[in-house]
Image (cartoon, rainbow, N blue to C red):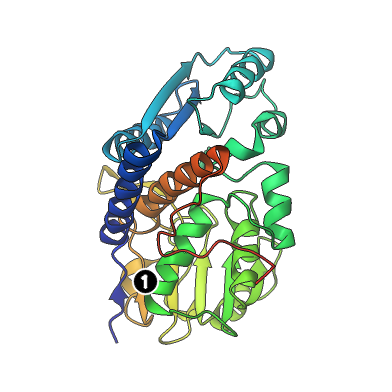
């Protein structure tokens, strides 16, 4: 068997097209141009590359971008002061503080300081709580992107066995909440899980977010399962650096029903979902009904 390759690049490009249309209409009909502020502290190479991609896509969608680069010695108080200014700025609808932050800054304090209405990362305690409670929320971009990719193969996740490897606040935990909202059966596995390969083999849809290169092997995957690889790991091979996921792609593709490649899978969807969240935040702040983008907001009144 050879898995269908889920083309995250193409699916993300399609979603970005919908975002660009929505931005155009908001601007033309309501005089609102969504604006996203991206804050990068220090010069972590991976973060610089992510931020460069994000800025490019923001500009390409017709939104306004505000680029804030701060030196690695920036104090927590200085960063909090910047966030205070961005919270108060009516032209800024979304605020993203790229993680990780330098050691002198407590990320929890920073995340909590971002106005939850502008928290397009969906990391704030308010949005995390709303997501967990099944209330409308700005949900984290990577997990939302993962669900959208999985649904291109399995349009309904209802009742399916899903396994998430990883329990981070950025991916694993919010992904589990989103899967519950989709009526999936959810197992969250992590570094202390016993018999991890056997747990993973139960999955109709397997999500790997561990940060270990090619950890998920062929015998961890049920034949025909959908595999969503969230890992981004830089490895050296034949004297050259390349990016691999958390899944041993070549061997797992022989047994899975569908699989996302790395790169070109979840990564582009994360950015497209960031743009969606920025439009949603701009609409909510302006009191305008938000465009659907083919997504269903989580709402427990349904
Ligand atoms: N670092 C790694 N992933 C992310 C993300 O989705 N958002 C932010 N702000 N930082 C990150």
Q: Give the residue drawn at x 51%, y 82%.
A: 204
Q: Give the residue drawn at x 59%, y 17%.
A: 85
**Is residue 97 in view?**
no
Q: Residue 203 at x, y = what percent?
A: 55, 80
Q: Residue 220 at x, y = what percent?
A: 50, 77
Q: Residue 97 at x, y = what percent?
A: 54, 31
Location of the N terminus by quadrant is bottom left
Toward the front, the furthest residue is: 29
Question: Few, some or many C-alpha atoms within 10 Å of disc 1 (few <14, some 14-19, many ≥20)?
Answer: many
* Residue 250 sits above or below residue 117 on the image: below
* Residue 294 sits above or below residue 112 on the image: below
Count of all numbered marks drawn on residues in the image: 1
**Is residue 30 in view?**
yes
* Residue 49 in which image quadrant: top left
Describe the element under mark 1 as helix, strand or loop.
strand
Q: Give the residue drawn at x 62%, y 39%.
A: 117
Name the foreground residue: 62 vs 190: 62
Q: Give the residue drawn at x 65%, y 33%.
A: 115
Name the foreground residue: 44 vs 302: 302
Name the foreground residue: 109 vs 183: 183
* Residue 84 sits above or below residue 272 on the image: above
Residue hosting label 1:
259
Location of the C terminus by quadrant is bottom right
């Amino acid at each position: 068997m050879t898995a269908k390759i889920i083309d995250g690049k193409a699916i993300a490009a399609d979603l970005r097209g919908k975002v660009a249309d929505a931005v155009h209409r908001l601007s033309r009909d309501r005089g609102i141009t969504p604006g996203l502020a991206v804050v990068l502290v220090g010069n972590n190479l991976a973060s610089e590359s992510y931020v460069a991609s994000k800025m490019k896509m923001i500009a390409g969608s017709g939104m306004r971008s505000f680029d804030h680069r701060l030196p690695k010695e920036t104090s927590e108080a200085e960063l909090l002061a910047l966030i205070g200014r961005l919270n108060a700025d009516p032209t800024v609808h979304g605020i993203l503080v790229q993680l990780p932050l330098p050691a002198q800054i407590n990320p929890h304090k920073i995340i909590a300081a971002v106005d939850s209405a502008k928290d397009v990362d969906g990391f704030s305690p308010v949005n995390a709580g709303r997501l967990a409670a099944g209330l409308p929320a700005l949900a984290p971009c990577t997990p939302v992107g993962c669900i959208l990719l999985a649904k291109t193969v399995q349009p309904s996740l209802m009742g399916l066995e899903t396994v998430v490897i990883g329990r981070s606040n950025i991916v694993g935990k919010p992904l589990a909440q989103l899967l519950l909202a989709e009526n999936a059966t959810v197992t969250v596995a992590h570094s202390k899980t016993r018999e991890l390969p056997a747990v993973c083999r139960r999955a109709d849809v397997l999500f790997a977010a561990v940060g270990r290169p090619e950890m998920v092997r062929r015998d961890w995957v049920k034949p025909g399962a959908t595999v969503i690889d969230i890992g981004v790991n830089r490895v050296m091979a034949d004297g050259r650096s390349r990016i691999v996921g958390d899944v041993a792609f070549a061997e797992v593709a022989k047994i899975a029903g569908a699989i996302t490649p790395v790169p070109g899978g979840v990564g582009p969807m994360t950015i497209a979902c960031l743009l969606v969240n920025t439009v949603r935040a701009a609409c909510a702040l302006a009191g305008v009904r938000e465009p659907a983008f083919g997504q269903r907001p989580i709402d427990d009144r349904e």
